[in-house]
Amino acid sequence: MPTLTELVVAALCLSGTFLIVLTGVGLVRFPDVFCRMHAAGKAGTLGVILVVLGATVYFAGTEQDVWMRGVLAVFFQLLTAPAATHLLARAAYVCDYPLAERTAVDELRGYLPSRPDQVFNQE
Amino acid sequence: MSPFLSTALMICLVALLASGILCLYRMCIGPKAADRAVAFDCVAAVFICIICVFCIRWNSVLYFDAVWILMLVGFLGSAAIAKYLEKGRVF
């Protein structure tokens, strides 16, 4: 009979793994790079956070300092994942990566320079 | 460790492996560099999850520090690729 801790750990790990699998499927099936970033940036982040929290909960009763390390890892992930995704998306848009054919609205058009070399030369 | 938890961890490992293979497939066929960078981020996430699952399975916290180090390295990799794509002009 599993204890309560094991139930919580299994639930956290399985749900996080489910989100990571969704990330992989989205990476393969989505049409353009911005949609793939959508899959990777949201589901991937939450999946990693859930699995790390599962490990933290498992070791929280036995090890002393693991609790702080797990919370630190979650904090780092929440801090860095949106920044990395935003940087990559901006770079891809500036470099004129093609949007998907079904794209309805492009609200960034006109706000970002679309040719990096020209902007670079103006400075 | 009860058989319930070890079975759940086994299912997690197999699913994570499948997701990693999907990410590597996108990294191989990705049309341009940004697709590969996104796939690299996902492979880093899959690695972090695999490390966590093995920590639980082996009942040891030896590798737990690798988790947030991998997070920081993945962020640095993505930022470096973005800077390279924009030809040095990030902000």
Image (spheres, coloured by chain):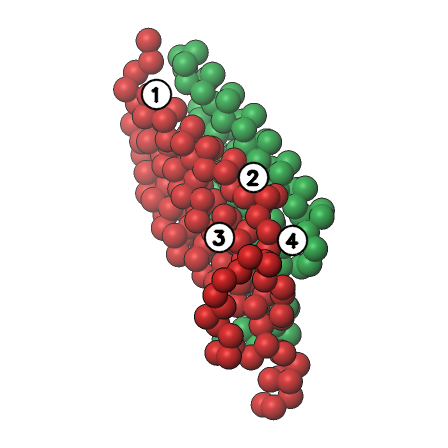
Q: CA distance from mark 1 to mark 4?
A: 37 Å
Residue where numbered disc 4 is placed? B36
Q: Residue at x 53, y 68 (%)?
A: A90
User: Pointer 3 indicates a residue of which chain?
Assistant: A
Amino acid carrying mark 1 in the image = Glu
Q: Is residue B16 visible?
A: yes
Considering depth in this image, is A114 or B19 the residue closer to the camera? A114
Residue where numbered disc 2 is placed? A25
Judge the density around disc 4: few (<14), some (14-19), many (≥20) Cα neighbours within 10 Å.
Answer: many
Of label 2 and label 3, which has the lower sequence position?
A: 2
Which shade of the palette goes to chain A? red
Q: CA distance from mark 4 to mark 2?
A: 15 Å
Name the element at disc 1: helix
Asked if labels 2 and 4 touch by Cβ distance under 8 angstroms, the answer is no
Name the element at disc 4: helix
Of label 3 and label 1, which has the lower sequence position?
A: 1
Amino acid carrying mark 3 in the image = His
Of label 1 and label 2, which has the lower sequence position?
A: 1
Q: Residue at x 28, y 19 (%)?
A: A4
